[in-house]
Amino acid sequence: MGDKHPKIIFTDQDQAMARALEVALPNTCHRLCQWHVHKKAPSKVLCFNSNNKVKGFLHKCFNKCDSKEEFEKALSQMITEGNLHNNGWLDDLYKIRNKWSTAFNKDYFNKGILSTQHSEPTNNICHGISKPTESSLGMLHYRKNVEIRRFFSAVTLD
């Protein structure tokens, strides 16, 4: 990138990556990919899947708060609704709220991007159908075989 650095960058919660970004790109705003954070919620907030109000308040904290005060109110409502007063994951997430809540990032224009959105769904699919040692070429061969099978299935149905 030469002498130009990105204004904003999205990553997962990897601490080594965060430290490296602070050193290598000190003037770049480091945000957390909301997809990664949200993906952890069901295992960290046990009532997440069974309580739509908790889920709604967390979503509001992520994207829908226009001010820090509105964020604090939504977070408080979520904690009360889900009885999450001693949830360590939420406590840790609160400490870095400026990295994931839109309420704390009004100074940076991000074109509505809130995650590493294009790569993650693809990564999820690939992890589900391939082995960690599988090469990209192996994945392409797999895809080609699937296409051939679909073609012959369609031909035999006619």
Image (cartoon, rainbow, N blue to C red):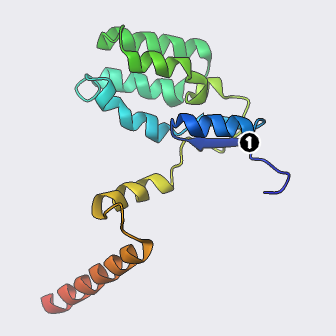
Residue closer to the observer: 136 or 74:
136
Camera-side residue: 68 or 92?
Answer: 92
Q: Position of residue 84 (x, y in %)?
A: 34, 12
Q: Which quadrant does the N terminus fall into?
A: bottom right
Q: Residue at x 42, y 57 (%)?
A: 123
Q: Secondary structure at mark 1?
A: helix
In the depicted structure, whether residue 136 falls above or below residue 69: below
**123 relative to 152, above or below:** above
Task: Tell me if mark 1 has few (under 14), some (14-19) or many (20+) residues whose alpha carbon lies within 10 angstroms of its own.
Answer: few
Choose top left, top right, bottom left or bottom right for residue 56. Answer: top left
Which residue does the image show at 45% across and 52% down from the upper left?
A: 120
Q: Residue furthest left?
A: 157
Q: Is residue 143 above or below residue 67?
A: below
Quadrant of residue 30 within the rendered picture: top right
Q: Position of residue 94 (x, y in %)?
A: 51, 18
Give the residue pinned by disc 1. Answer: 24
48 left or right of 33? left
Q: Residue at x 34, y 58 (%)?
A: 127
Kind of residue at badge 1: Ala
The foreground one among 35 and 21 is: 21
